[in-house]
Amino acid sequence: MRKRYTRITTLAVAWASISAHAQLTYQLDSTLLAIDVVVDSDRVNMPWEILWGPDDRLWMTDGPLITRWDPVTDVVDTVLQRAYGNGLGMALHPDFPAVPEVMVVFDTADYYGNGHLCEVSRFTYDAINDTLIDELILLTYYHAGEHAAGRLLFDTTGHVLLTTADYYFNGPDTLFSTYGKTLRFATDGSVPADNPRADHTWTWGHRNPQGLAMLPNGAIVNSEHGQMPFENEINLLQRDEDHGYPYYDGNTCFINPDTCASPTYTFTHPIHTFGHPPAGCEYYTSNAIPEFQNKLITGILWHKGIILFDFNASLDSVTSEEYLQGGAFDDMWRNRDIAIRPDGSFYLITNDRMDARIRWVHPDFSTEAEPTPADPGAIRIWPNPATDRVNVAVDGDAAIDLLDAQGRTLVAPIQRMGDHYMIGIGALPAGLYAVLVTRQQRSTVQRVVKR
């Protein structure tokens, strides 16, 4: 059964809601971050994975549901309502929607700490009916307790990587064992010909991987919980490598001193160890937030804040970490996952398990500084929010209109000021408006907030 929250449309403008929660801010070196609640706990229950889709919507696993949030209309659609299970990782095919395949991990219990078996399924996206259909369970894996892992990511070859977890008592690695590994499989569930052995194993010796991210060079890293304090890990995942667990936790000999002291036992060390238990991670390449550029961002579980990891030029070693805490992050416990938009803003699952919500983190352009666009031909609007005027910079000639929340054109003073337009909004009441820019028979709408 598919459920759709009421969709609201107007003239060519649909409005994203401004949350009743006060906007939070966090000051970086030169960038002021604004942090808004965009999906509150009355519309999301137990989100685990969020990802930004090519349809410009935020896809989410949420218990037995797969949902999407549209930032333009503020609508949350349910594209899958499964009969059972708790959604973990999810990945859209790299050529989605041309290849309409969606991979999802479901724990078979209603909460992943209550069950012991995860199912990895492939769905087909039905664009006509806007829903996921034809579930095919490709493989299953056992987990103990809350250590379920379950993150998914397509690699550069079009095969799928999957993290699984281990509670050290599961014993040494064996063929076809799924404990504590990165598994790699084709979209039909088969073993790729270039896997290192006759099963799905790609790497092994992991405890509880929480995140997977692709670096700009195509390499894959994970964020992983260690057993002991300060032994959480960032690992570079390469074919047929043992990452040490349970014999080593981080870089520390852990279980079997004889093995740890053995001259013949070797393992791949993490490229970094650190103190705070990590969550989902993404590599940030945008210049929208310069302080984050070319760094891995991971959320934190059991603590507040996020961590930034800087890499060396060859992307095979972490050179530094920065823990962002305090201020706005005091309101944000258990930051479960991150999804980065093409414009460099990003979303976080915060307050996981307790009062889950989705927050949007973006530069605050409430000052008079003109933002630098990633696309030189993009429309730039600043300040936003604004009090008395809005500046609109657009390449070439354009028709500029100001619209209200119902999509009606307003009478407002608009002046051409050299290479940009200035709209006077001082006489208007506070609220949501939109700037409609028409050029070369194409129209673009951007929201603006009047304080």
Image (cartoon, rainbow, N blue to C red):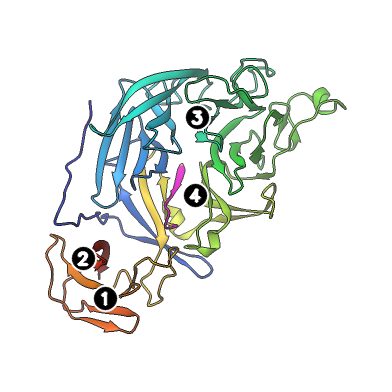
In the rendered image of this protein, does residue 43 appear above or below residue 442?
A: above
User: Pointer 3: what residue?
Assistant: 150
Instruction: Looking at the image, tell me whether mark 3 or mark 1 is earlier in sequence order.
Output: 3
Q: CA distance from mark 1 to mark 2?
A: 12 Å
Q: Determine whether the residue tagged by mark 1 lies in a helix, strand or loop.
A: loop
Nearer to me, 22 or 419: 419
The quadrant holding residue 386 is bottom left
Name the spot of residue 435 as percent of width and height, x first.
24, 67
Nearer to me, 337 or 135: 135
User: Pointer 4: what residue?
Assistant: 304
Q: CA distance from mark 1 to mark 4?
A: 33 Å
User: Pointer 2: what residue?
Assistant: 433
Does the residue at mark 4 contact the one at mark 3 (Cβ under 8 Å)? no
Instruction: Tell which tag, 2 or 4, sits nearer the viewer.
Output: 2
The quadrant holding residue 278 is top right
Mark 1 closeness class: few <14, some 14–19, many ≥20 residues within 10 Å? some
In the rendered image of this protein, does residue 168 appear above or below residue 216?
A: above
Instruction: Looking at the image, tell me whether mark 4 or mark 3 is earlier in sequence order.
Output: 3
User: Pointer 1: what residue?
Assistant: 387
Q: Is residue 434 left or right of residue 55?
A: left
Amino acid type assigned to the residue bearing label 1 in the image: Thr
The quadrant holding residue 355 is top left
Instruction: Looking at the image, tell me whether mark 3 or mark 2 is earlier in sequence order.
Output: 3
